[in-house]
Image (cartoon, rainbow, N blue to C red):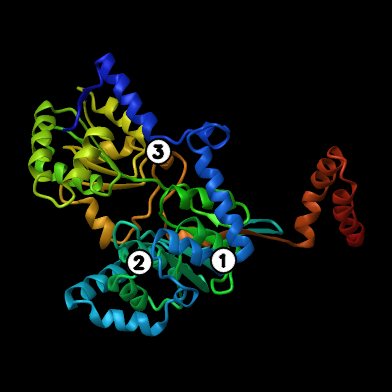
Amino acid sequence: MIPILRLSDSKDREQIEALLKQLRLDPREFVTANSPRAKTVADVDKILADVAQRGDAALVESSKKFDDPNFSADQIRVTDREMSEAAARVPADQMSALRRSIDQVREYQTHIMPASPKPLERPGVELGLRFTPLDSAGLYFPGGKASYPSSLIMLAVPAQVAGVKKIVVCTPPSKYGRSDLVLAACHELKLEHVYRAGGAAAIGAMAFGTQTIPAVDKIVGPGNTYVQLAKRALAGCVGIDGFLGPSEILVLADDSGQADFIASDLIAQAEHDPGSCFLLTTSNRVAQEVEKELERQTALLGRSKAIADALKQRSGIIVDDSMDNLIALANRFAAEHVNVQTTDNHAVLSKLIHAGAVFVGPHSPVAAGDYVAGPSHCLPTNTTARFSNGISVYEFLKRGSVVKYTEEGLAKDTPAIIALANAEHLDGHAASAKIRAAHRG
């Protein structure tokens, strides 16, 4: 079902490199006219241009085509009544779980909310840093294949904790986007701007604004290739979080790894359809036992075909005698989720530098992070954890420096200011310091 590959074998290394290449975004695809991505980019550009020109009418047309043939403009905005009535229909145990998730995500995001550092002081100079929230943010989460109220929570709570004034939510008007659980989560979060809009059209609506949906300053959230390309096309006009792809997991384990736990975590990501999962281990026994467990557990689950496809086509078990070699490989994979199950997790963590989120020990399943632990499950994929971060309260804050000089403090820096300004042939810069020096006498 899943290939077992050895890092020491040259042919297996070629297959490992192919798996890495499959995951990693190729920058050439974004600039080459005849690349596989080129047609999709052109389609996205057309959708965005249509929304920019026709607003709600373009949204309705897109929604009829992809989600609901009976969709109309009066269904775009979700009313408070719809949300409260949906919440009343949700079973008590599910409402309790929603509230637990919201409370614990809020607790964690509040805990990591940054405070301005103490100013750096020199004689006559005070240099500080402050954090201020965005005025508005657009949150997108998919609804084509399943209902994802958890993704809404993982996006909305960090924005609320940051202090964003206007939070705009878009999800497709499919049966999943209309689910009672999604609307109940909106109700519990007390969201006021909730809209039925999907795909690239929804991203355009939040960037341009339409007759119904207000424009925002930053757009974040998971979604298909059309959604991510739409965000990319508009980056710079609005802020974005990154280019988010299919779900991933990588497990680092030695002989202490528990095979049934590892297999269950791999399967949990493979079932996202598409998903990819990797076990990097120093233990032949663990590798073989996990392979057997994957077959046994997959046969018991509802999405067994999707899981089997992911395990066969986009996943692998990689074995090597050296944990250091495996950690180096894990840093190249820079996976969305990494679970560490070794006899010295601390030593592994000290060398593991690229991962969206790390889950330490056998009793830390990724599913805990998906729903209730507290950190957001909206994380970098496609090896982009090499340079990007998951969603948190930081995503909705701006950093700004604060500079304060006294007359005496400026006098000490004035000669350097004038010298550098003159070297760059910027007389006005030099003059702005000279005029103050002359005034001081």
Determine which of the numbered discs, if any, sits on residue 383 in the image.
3
In which quadrant is the N terminus drawn? top left
- Whichever of labels 1 and 3 marks the residue nearer the N terminus, that label is 1
Provide the secondary structure element on which disc 1 rests: loop
Q: Residues within 10 Å of mark 1 (few under 14, many from 20)?
A: many
Q: Is residue 113 above or below residue 420?
A: below
Q: Residues within 10 Å of mark 2 (few under 14, many from 20)?
A: many
403 sits to left or right of 185: right
Front disc: 3 or 2:
2
Residue assigned mark 2 = 177
Q: Is residue 133 visible?
A: no
Determine which of the numbered discs, if any, sits on residue 216 in the image.
1
Quadrant assignment, res 407: bottom right
The amino acid on which the numbered mark 1 sits, given as a three-letter code, is Val
In depth, the one of 318 and 233 nearer the eye is 233
Provide the secondary structure element on which disc 3 rests: loop
- Whichever of labels 3 and 2 marks the residue nearer the N terminus, that label is 2
439 sits to left or right of 317: right
The amino acid on which the numbered mark 3 sits, given as a three-letter code, is Thr
In depth, the one of 176 and 351 nearer the eye is 176
Q: Residue at x 35, y 78 (%)?
A: 187
